Image: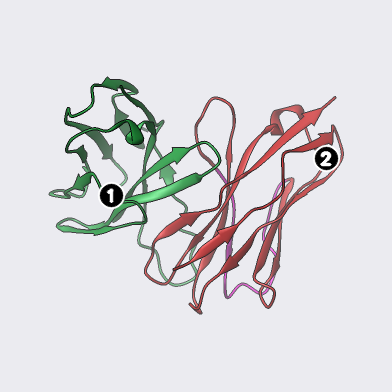
């Protein structure tokens, strides 16, 4: 069974600073995909960024970048220049070889002015 | 663009009652899934479907049934509600894609279910 681990406690980050959210995964599949989603207090799930297991370069989407270290099975999310609107729960997810999408338990981020 | 539509948004059930959570998508996505979200547990996969007529169990399937008679609809049935099924339920859909392709999941707005 696949497993996604997010172990950081709630994080406080100063506005305009960068924050890194850790995610490690466990899979025996060669082909898989890694995703990060944001869930603000309003509850909706917002897709942020994707990394394929065969992608050689780290994914970037605006202020979001994914630090993909395949050998270590880690896919950390980096949010640069934090904004107050970044306060939310962040979930790491993995699509396995059977196309199931499984989520970690999430990281809570609070951006303080 | 409607995307993924879940109904109802809120529901209170008595223990032992049955009900169906509706999910519909208009993006012609092959894959659809149901998740439940509980505090500190993230999103856990209940059931999923890779196409019309095909369903499979996820991580926490007990107490739930699904069917996929059309590409668009993927209802989740609670057979006999229990307080342990109090949760927020999300339906998601995504395209099949090809190997290594970004196939992001699109989520409904969620259904907050309380079983008393």
In the picture, residue A37 is in which quadrant? top right
Which residue has dot 1 on it?
A: B28
Above/below status of A97 relative to A90 = below
Disc 2: which chain?
A
The one nearer the camera, B90 or B98, is B90
Q: Position of residue B32 (x, y in %)?
A: 31, 50
Please tell me whether mark 1 sits on a helix, a strand or a loop: loop
Q: Position of residue A24 (x, y in %)?
A: 64, 63
Q: Is residue B32 visible?
A: no
Left or right position of B25 against A45: left
> Can you tell which chain is drawn green?
B
Please tell me whether mark 2 sits on a helix, a strand or a loop: loop
Q: Which residues are magenta?
A: A47-62
The one nearer the camera, B85 or B67, is B85
Q: Position of residue B98 (x, y in %)?
A: 41, 69
Nearer the observer: mark 2 or 1; the answer is 2
Q: Are marks 2 and 1 on the same chain?
A: no
Left or right position of B40 against B26: right
Q: Position of residue B42 (x, y in %)?
A: 51, 45
Q: Quadrant of the C terminus of chain B?
A: top left
- Whole-number angstrom distance, CA of label 2 to CA of label 1: 37 Å
* Residue A111 on the magenta span: no
Which residue has dot 2 on it?
A: A81
Count residues near mark 2 (Cα–Cα under 10 Å), then give few for <14, some for 14-19, many for 20+. some
* Image colour assigned to chain A: red
Q: Looking at the image, which residue is at 19% across and 39% down?
A: B77
């Amino acid at each position: 069974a696949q497993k996604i681990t997010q172990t950081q406690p709630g994080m406080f980050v100063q506005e305009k600073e960068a924050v890194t959210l850790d995610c490690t995964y466990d899979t025996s599949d060669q082909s898989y995909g890694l995703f990060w989603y944001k869930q603000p207090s309003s509850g909706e799930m917002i897709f942020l960024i994707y990394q394929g297991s065969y992608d050689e370069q780290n994914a970037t989407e605006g202020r979001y970048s994914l630090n993909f270290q395949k050998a270590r099975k880690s896919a950390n999310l980096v949010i640069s220049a934090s904004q107050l609107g970044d306060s939310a729960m962040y979930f790491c997810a993995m699509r396995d070889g059977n196309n199931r999408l499984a989520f970690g338990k999430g990281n809570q981020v609070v951006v303080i002015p | 663009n409607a995307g993924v539509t879940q109904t109802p948004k809120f529901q209170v059930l008595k223990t032992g009652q049955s009900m169906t959570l509706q999910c519909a998508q208009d993006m012609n996505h092959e894959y659809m899934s149901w998740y439940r979200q509980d505090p500190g547990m993230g999103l856990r996969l209940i059931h999923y479907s890779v196409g019309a007529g095909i369903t499979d169990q996820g991580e926490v399937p007990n107490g739930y049934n699904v069917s996929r008679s059309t590409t668009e609809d993927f209802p989740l049935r609670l057979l006999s509600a229990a307080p342990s099924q109090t949760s927020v339920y999300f339906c998601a859909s995504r395209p099949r894609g090809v190997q290594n392709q970004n196939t992001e999941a699109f989520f409904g707005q969620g259904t907050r279910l309380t079983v008393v």
